[in-house]
Amino acid sequence: MSNRRNLLSFQLDVSDFLPADRSEKESLVLMRKSVGFWRDGINRLRKNKVAMVSFFIIILTLVFAFIGPAVYPYSYEQQIRGNENLAPMKYSEMEMEKKAAGEFVFPHFLGTDNLGRDTTVRIMMGSRISLLVGIIASFLVLLIGSVYGSVSGYIGGKTDMIMMQIVDVIYAIPDILIIIILMVSLKYPLQNIANEVPGFEWINTIGVGLICIFIVFSLLYWVGMARIVRSQILSLKEQEYITAARALGAGDARIIGKHLLTNSIGTLIVTTTLQIPSAIFTESFLSFIGIGVSAPMPSLGSMASAAIGGISTYPYRLLAPAVMISIIILTFNLFGDGLRDAFDPKLKN
């Protein structure tokens, strides 16, 4: 009798159901455990050494700026008579006498300025102001620009044309001029509110200039984000999954928020992260020319401006805020690139 099996027969072969041996098990392709979008992005971000080092430096900078002044023995506005123009790690004659008497005198790591104020704690407070300006301004730009650009790109047609023409008009407005106009028009009303209304004394602390900077960011600086988001929405709204979402009955708001903006997360993260150093530059420049943070509140820009006059005699006064600005901007740029590489779906492979 022939043992050949008829291929057209429905008879089962018992050998097909035998347990797999070891070699057959090893030849199987093991599938990776499914992970979510954010978990997968974080895992890839951890593998980026440059981004993780930048993130670690950003954390140290935040600790330096927000926790350092609370534990530092000197305050940013404290003027110590006799401690004017001290070099880094130097002591005044009065402090030397205290040390000779056995008292502990905390050193001035970066020296003092011409008013006897410790430079280190002022760098801390200046970094805090710069970081707050950068983070708050970037959040405002992201919120306004993403909403405006996504609505414009998704609706399209005449609405898109009119909204982009408004963006072109805003682009033509000089931001420095608007800040100066706002400072002139809002200076006295805001000062009256700070002096007369309880609970608004913080206006005098941060200054009218800084408030005007935030207003200008809200009015003008979101247009770049809006254009970038619009270009992303125009390229994504014709994809098949958007058509499928419409067929399933998803509303316009859900499509924009759940599908379009989510798939633009890489661009949003990078643009927002890069907006932080841009905002810090703007605030530092305005403080440098005297229309930013009000004294005695320090800013990295105002400290650099005060150090220009004595750059040949006290170069370390200019070097300290300049290095701090460079560190903040460089680390945010590198970390932003790492976030783009980790969370952009187009770069996943």
Image (cartoon, rainbow, N blue to C red):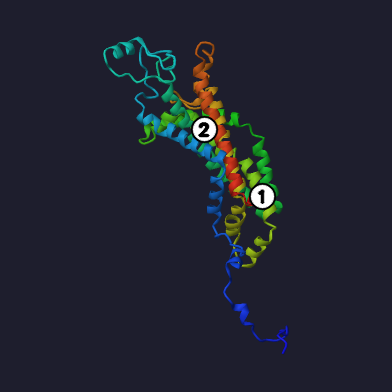
Specify the quadrant of the image occupied by residue 92.
top left
Helix, strand or loop for disc 2: helix
The residue that appears at 35% across and 30% down in the rendered structure is 71
* Residue at disc 1, secondary structure: helix
> Along the polypeptide, which appears first: circle 2 or circle 1?
2
Judge whether 11 appears above or below 259 on screen: below
Density class for disc 1 (Cα within 10 Å; few <14, some 14-19, many ≥20) is: many
Q: Residue at x 36, y 23 (%)?
A: 74
Residue 193 visible from this viewpoint: no
Task: Residue lying at the far front in this picture: please name it.
Answer: 1
Looking at the image, which residue is at 43% across and 31% down? 64
Residue that badge 2 annotates: 212
User: Is 94 located above or below residue 272 in the figure?
Assistant: above
The amino acid beneath tag 2 is Cys
**Residue 255 visible to an observer of this rendering:** yes
Q: Is residue 294 above or below residue 7?
A: above
Estimate how packed mark 2 is, as few (under 14), some (14 to 19) or many (20 or more) residues with alpha carbons within 10 Å.
many
Is residue 98 rendered to the left or right of residue 7? left
Amino acid, disc 1 = Gln
Q: Quadrant of residue 167?
A: top right
Q: List x then y, in percent, for residue 243.
A: 67, 63
Q: Nearer the viewer, residue 262 or 249?
A: 262
Quarter of the image that includes the N terminus: bottom right
- The foreground one among 101 and 189 is 101
In the current view of this chain or complex, which residue is farthest to the left?
101
Q: Nearer the viewer, residue 114 or 172?
A: 114
Residue 157, given in percent of the width and then of the height, sits at: 71, 53
Residue 60, x across and y down, in percent? 46, 34
Count the numbered circles shown.
2
- Identify the residue under disc 1: 232
